[in-house]
């Protein structure tokens, strides 16, 4: 039997659902084609993506606690 290597989808690497990935159209916000955006996401080490996600979550929490204007000053 041959073992198939599972293909990791871009939304898995970003830690979001497929539905969220498709509805948010992140590649449009990045002003890229979907294909180019997915190639970029797949080329980055997972540690980089994890760090970016952590920073984004931190900013969201800070905005909720201190307000958006306070976070922009940081």
Image (spheres, rainbow, N blue to C red):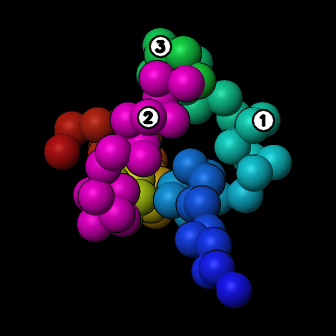
63 drawn magenta: no
Q: Position of residue 50 (x, y in %)?
A: 36, 65
Boundaries of the magenta span: 35-51
Which secondary structure lies at badge 2?
A: helix
45 drawn magenta: yes
Quadrant (top left, top right, bottom left, bottom right) of the C terminus: top left
Q: Residue at x 75, y 37 (%)?
A: 22
Q: Position of residue 4 (x, y in %)?
A: 63, 73
Mark 3 vs 2: CB contact within 8 A = no
Q: How many marks?
A: 3
> Of label 1 and label 2, which has the lower sequence position?
1
Q: Position of residue 61 (x, y in %)?
A: 46, 62
Question: Is most of the magenta stretch helix, strand or loop?
Answer: helix
Q: Nearer the viewer, mark 1 or mark 2?
A: 2
Quadrant (top left, top right, bottom left, bottom right) of the N terminus: bottom right
| Residue on which disc 2 sits | 39
Decide: is 54 above or below 37.
below
Which secondary structure lies at badge 1?
A: helix
Answer yes or no: is residue 1 visible: yes
Label 1: few (<14), some (14–19) or many (≥20) C-alpha neighbours in 10 Å: few
Q: Nearer the viewer, mark 3 or mark 2?
A: 2
Q: Position of residue 68 (x, y in %)?
A: 42, 41
Residue 31's mark?
3
Mark 3 vs 1: CB contact within 8 A = no
Decide: is 21 above or below 8.
above
Picture quadrant where residue 34 is located = top right
| Residue on which disc 1 sits | 23
Compared across the picture, whether 40 is left or right of 24 comes to left
Mark 1 vs 2: CB contact within 8 A = no
């Amino acid at each position: 039997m041959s073992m198939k290597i599972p293909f990791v989808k871009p939304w898995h690497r970003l830690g979001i659902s497929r539905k969220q990935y498709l509805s948010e159209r992140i590649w449009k916000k990045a002003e890229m084609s979907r294909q180019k955006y997915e190639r970029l996401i797949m080329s980055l080490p997972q540690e980089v993506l994890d760090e970016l996600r952590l920073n984004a979550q931190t900013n969201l929490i800070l905005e909720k606690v201190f307000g958006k204007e306070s976070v922009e000053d940081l």
